[in-house]
Image (spheres, grey):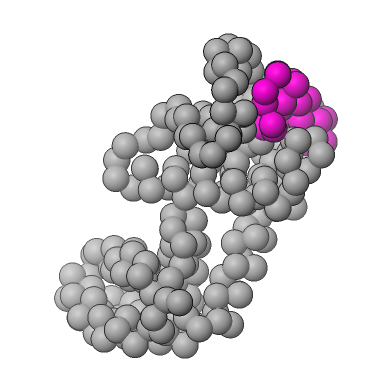
């Protein structure tokens, strides 16, 4: 099956979910945003990607504390959101009217899940070549240009020093910093208040060099204190 054919079949399955009375739309939330956003999902692209990003952060956070995400029903205002994990990097999200019965949605989705997983697998790496982290990379670039940019640059510089003391190259330090920035953006909203989570992630990469890790964690605390206060 071609990548395009797999995508079309996946869109068709999500449209079937969206056709149930009281369902506003359905998407697959991935690390790179919403799959099937736009008219085919019943949701505007911006809304679909915002929902996908929020769900992704929930998934990463739950995995971090060792409690993998299960099916969730979240009520907000006149609507609610049904979240059903597919695999580590993908989750089905269905938006419903508040008083819509969940059973018809759950029954149809239970019959679709295996096929949806297979269709995602069929898209494989070819899909990644088109979407690979573009949204997250754009957000990293935006943040580095913003108020947190100077603080993040300082943290990156300090991190590279202690990665070097741990016997790794400057290139490896840059790659590790980028990976942790991505994880930080995916698990929480970037702000001065969540900087300790980024720093903790960086420190974990130095677990095999405890002396360098301890020195880095001590030095970087002063840098965090210089971060601009949130508005």
Residue at image position (33%, 64%) is: 197
Q: Is residue 107 above or below residue 192?
A: above
Residue at image position (74%, 52%) is: 130
In the visual, does 79 lie left or right of 134? left
The percent position of residue 76, horizontal first and vertical second, equals 51, 39
In depth, the one of 83 and 89 nearer the eye is 83
The percent position of residue 29, horizontal first and vertical second, equals 60, 41
In the visual, does 108 lie left or right of 126? left
Q: What stretch of residues is rendered in magenta?
A: 3-26
The C terminus appears in which quarter of the rendering?
Answer: bottom left
Q: Is residue 107 above or below residue 24?
A: above
Question: Is residue 212 among the parts visible in the rendering?
Answer: no
Q: Is residue 194 above or below residue 131?
A: below
In the visual, does 188 lie left or right of 143? left
The percent position of residue 166, horizontal first and vertical second, equals 28, 76
Residue at image position (74%, 49%) is: 45
Which quadrant of the figure has residue 70? top left
- Dominant SS type (magenta): helix
In depth, the one of 43 and 14 nearer the eye is 43
């Amino acid at each position: 099956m071609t990548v395009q054919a797999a995508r079309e079949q996946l869109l068709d399955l999500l449209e079937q979910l969206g056709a149930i009375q009281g369902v506003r739309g359905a998407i697959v939330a991935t690390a790179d945003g919403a799959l099937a956003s736009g008219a085919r999902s019943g949701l505007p692209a911006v809304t679909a990607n915002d929902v996908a990003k929020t769900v992704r952060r929930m998934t990463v956070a739950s995995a971090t504390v060792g409690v993998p995400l299960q099916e969730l029903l979240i009520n907000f205002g006149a609507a609610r959101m049904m979240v059903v994990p597919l695999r580590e990097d993908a989750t089905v999200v269905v938006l419903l009217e508040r008083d819509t019965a969940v059973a018809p949605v759950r029954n149809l989705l239970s019959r679709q899940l295996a096929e949806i997983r297979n269709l995602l697998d069929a898209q494989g790496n070819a899909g990644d070549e088109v979407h690979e982290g573009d949204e997250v990379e754009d957000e990293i670039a935006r943040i580095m240009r913003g108020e947190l940019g100077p603080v993040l640059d300082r943290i990156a510089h300090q991190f590279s020093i202690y990665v070097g003391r741990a016997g790794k190259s400057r290139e490896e330090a840059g790659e590790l910093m980028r990976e942790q920035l991505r994880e930080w953006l995916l698990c929480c909203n970037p702000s001065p208040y969540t900087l300790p989570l980024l720093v903790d992630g960086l420190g974990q990469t130095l677990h095999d060099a405890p002396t360098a890790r301890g020195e880095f964690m001590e030095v970087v605390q002063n840098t965090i204190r210089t971060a601009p206060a949130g508005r």
